[in-house]
Amino acid sequence: MTYAIHERDGLPVEFQTLLADYPREAWPDHPNFAQSIQHWMGAHQMFKRLGAILTKETQMFLDRNRSVDEFGGRIGFYGNQLVNNLHGHHHWEDHEYFPELSAADNRFDVGLDMLETDHTEMDKILDDFTNVGNRTLKLSQLDPALAYEEAGKLLTTTQAIETFLARHLADEEDLVVPILLHHKMRG
């Protein structure tokens, strides 16, 4: 399984207009860095942690350091948390948050569109994770040897999730937080 994850080396320059005035290292001390922004960024940290847990649990299963039952329980719980919460988060961003940002500063609409495209691509990876994860769990009960083979595919998918989230969430924060600080939003 391969994924066409667009490799961006950070936020494209054309979307960094406000980032130059509001660099990441200065955000926590900025008077407009509201608690709502911190919570939004906290959700991003949670998604990255969940992605890392899924990769670790899958690798532990492949290394035979996690029993079938332990693996099934953990991958089901953490996978469900990631998929459901990330879908809800992206839906809210696409339908409420990004339109609010666009209304405040439409210079960045193309950047917001780029982030929405990322969300669509992430949905495909999450669907693959769900399908391969469910297949791995079913096989773990029917044919453990095949389950390990399928878990190798699952590992590729969880690693893709981690890679994608690291890039996407950094780009998203680098675009969105300066808009929020500049326009004194969410305070």
Image (cartoon, grey):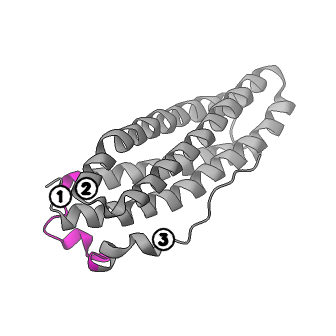
Q: Is residue 60 visible?
A: no
Q: Disc 1 designates what residue?
A: 34
Q: Disc 3 designates what residue?
A: 12
Please state the extent of the stretch shown in magenta in the rendering. 21-37
Q: Amino acid at mark 1?
A: Ala
Of labels 3 and 2, earlier in sequence is 3
Q: Is residue 140 left or right of residue 171?
A: right
Q: Amino acid at mark 2?
A: Ile
The percent position of residue 138, horizontal first and vertical second, equals: 73, 22
98 vs 69, nearest the viewer: 98
Disc number at residue 37?
A: 2
Q: Amino acid at mark 3?
A: Pro
Circle 1: element type: loop
Cα separation between marks 3 and 1: 25 Å
Q: Is residue 10 visible?
A: yes
Cβ atoms at labels 2 and 1 below 8 Å apart: yes
The percent position of residue 160, horizontal first and vertical second, equals: 64, 52
Q: Quadrant of residue 31?
A: bottom left
Disc number at residue 116?
A: none
